[in-house]
Amino acid sequence: MSDQNDSAISRREFARRAAFVSAAATLTPSNLLSAGSIATPLPAQLPANAPKLSPEGQAEVDSRIQSVFAQYGSRLSDAQKTDIRRLATEAQPPLERLRAFPAENGDGPGLYLKPLMERERKPSPMPATPKPASAPKNS
């Protein structure tokens, strides 16, 4: 171990520093890490045919929109931002219906390929019986 570089840190020291950094990241205010231009987007006008969402569903839609805007907001036009809001709002009711379906880890697939009507099976032809091997002829 004497051939290691003096500036290299040990695994234990690396883990300790990583733990400090992750702890510090959880304690910092979240608005410090986000860009200032996308801190609070203006509430968009939803179309009249927008689905009615529960408060939890609306909060999930808002957080989904915020995460997309935080990552790609500077590259999106106003029309694209409006489209993202519309798509996130329209996608929420099917998500809630899907989550309401009870499922456990041991459950099988929900779709099995079943024929709508049974058909008569054709009798399979009898396989041809192989002829016994003939003994070699001695000439």
Image: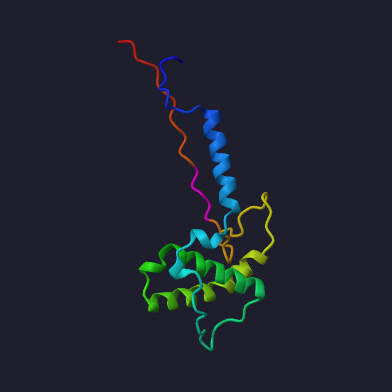
Q: Which residues are magenta?
A: 122-126
Which picture quadrant has residue 7?
top left
Q: Position of residue 45 (x, y in %)?
A: 51, 85
Closer-to-camera residue (11/36): 36
Q: Is residue 101 above or below residue 44?
A: above
* Quarter placement of the C terminus: top left
Q: Is residue 106 above or below residue 135?
A: below
Q: Is residue 94 above or below residue 134?
A: below
Residue pictured at 34% horizontal, 14% vertical: 137
Q: Is residue 39 magenta?
A: no
Residue pictured at 59% horizontal, 68% vertical: 60
Q: Residue furthest bottom?
A: 48
Q: Residue furthest top?
A: 139
Q: How many marks?
A: 0
Closer-to-camera residue (112/34): 34
Q: Position of residue 136 (x, y in %)?
A: 36, 15
Residue pictured at 55% horizontal, 34% vertical: 15
Which picture quadrant has residue 8?
top left
Magenta span main SS: loop
Which picture quadrant has residue 54?
bottom right
Q: Is residue 129 above or below residue 109?
A: above
Residue pictured at 58% horizontal, 66% vertical: 117
